[in-house]
Image (tube, rainbow, N blue to C red):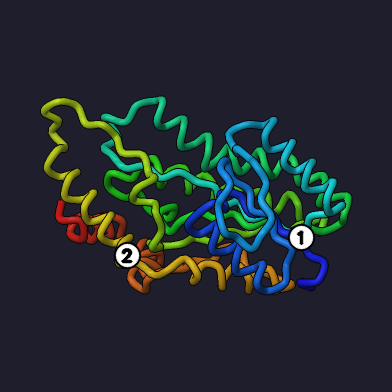
């Protein structure tokens, strides 16, 4: 894809993976619009106010973008919300909040842009999912479920939009060194919860893994390759070797054996 005229929209671009991807693509010559609820400082890309949990906000932001450019070539659905906690004690309110961002937020953006792509007779949708989508993880069940939903929607959209020359794929990052530890939702445990000790240990391990993870530029480089590939694959797993290997182990090993590996890994 030519960088001289291509317009790219990235949601959740105020920090972390979204900001890194936006800045990297802008440096490569693309016209990048980074969308988020709050405006980031000191960026090299154009900013749009957008809250993916609001249909009105999504439509207004895309209307403004098109009024400036007349077209859009790529959308990167990156806006997302993390959550940790035992399923038994996770409230409906928190579950809805996560799915409203991670799943419905993506659908709102896609529904608004698909007619634009169809009129242009081309377009590329890149959904930022997670390696966690490939397996249920302890105390991250809601997050894994939301990202697994996004993977299935990606596959369905890819087939539905093929005849219109609209390509759809997903990127599945493993742990990335971002501010997710500070921004993710943490379930408030009940008084004298039976999960207190186990959850505390696993939560610390999750945070430590993020702190030691690669920088988000690793994801940005992969996204650039996808954009520049005329025939991108359907899914791209990006992350530490062991996390990517877990996807294959889940397929190859007996299910309970793989479950025991996870239990041992998290010290459960």
- At label 1, counting other C-alpha atoms closer than 10 Å, the crowd grade (few under 14, some 14-19, many 20 or more) is many
Residue lying furthest front in this view?
42
What residue sits right under mark 2 in the picture?
A: 253
Residue 158 in the figure: left or right of residue 136 = right
Does residue 112 sit above or below 220 in this rendering?
A: above
Q: Residue at x 44, y 52 (%)?
A: 133
- At label 2, counting other C-alpha atoms closer than 10 Å, the crowd grade (few under 14, some 14-19, many 20 or more) is few
Q: Nearer the viewer, residue 3 or 109?
A: 3
Q: Quadrant of residue 24?
A: bottom right
Give the mark nearest the N terminus, 2 or 1: 1
Q: Residue at x 36, y 66 (%)?
A: 243
Residue 141 in the figure: left or right of residue 126 = left
Q: Nearer the viewer, residue 95 or 81?
A: 81
Residue 88 location (% of width, % of height): 27, 31
Find out whether the residues at labels 2 and 1 contact each other: C-beta distance under 8 Å: no
Q: Which mark is residue 119?
A: none
Q: Secondary structure at mark 1?
A: strand
Residue 147 visible within the image: yes
What residue sits right under mark 1 in the picture?
A: 7
Q: Nearer the viewer, residue 12 or 119?
A: 12
Q: Residue at x 63, y 48 (%)?
A: 35
Q: Quadrant of residue 169?
A: bottom right
Does residue 119 sit above or below 52 in this rendering?
A: below
Residue 143 location (% of width, % of height): 40, 44
Residue 31 in the figure: left or right of residue 152 = right
Residue 175 location (% of width, % of height): 38, 61
Residue 252 visible within the image: no
Q: CA distance from mark 2 to mark 1?
A: 43 Å
Does residue 92 sit above or below 125 in this rendering?
A: above
């Amino acid at each position: 894809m030519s960088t001289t005229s291509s317009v790219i929209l990235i949601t959740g671009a105020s920090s972390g993976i979204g900001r890194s991807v936006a800045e990297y693509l802008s440096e490569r010559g693309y016209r990048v619009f980074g969308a988020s609820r709050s405006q980031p400082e000191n960026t090299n890309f154009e900013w749009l106010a957008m809250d993916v949990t609001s249909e009105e906000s999504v439509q207004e932001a895309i209307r403004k973008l098109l009024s400036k450019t007349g077209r859009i070539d790529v959308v990167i659905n990156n806006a997302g919300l993390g959550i940790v906690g035992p399923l038994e004690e996770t409230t409906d309110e928190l579950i809805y909040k996560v799915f409203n961002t991670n799943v419905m937020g993506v659908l709102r953006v896609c529904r608004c842009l698909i007619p634009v792509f169809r009129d242009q007779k081309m377009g590329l949708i890149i959904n930022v999912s997670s390696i966690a989508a490939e397996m249920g993880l302890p105390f991250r069940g809601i997050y894994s479920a939301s990202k697994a939903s996004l993977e299935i929607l990606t596959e369905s959209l890819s087939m539905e939009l093929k005849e219109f020359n609209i390509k759809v794929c997903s990127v599945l990052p493993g742990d990335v060194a971002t501010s997710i530890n500070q921004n993710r939702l943490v379930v408030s445990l009940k008084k004298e919860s039976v999960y207190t000790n186990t959850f505390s240990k696993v939560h610390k391990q999750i945070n430590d893994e993020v702190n030691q993870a690669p920088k988000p530029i690793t994801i940005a480089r992969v996204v650039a390759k996808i954009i520049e590939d005329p025939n991108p694959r359907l899914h791209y797993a990006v992350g530490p070797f062991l996390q990517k290997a877990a996807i294959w182990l889940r397929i190859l090993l007996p299910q309970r054996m793989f479950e025991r590996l996870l239990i041992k890994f998290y010290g459960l």
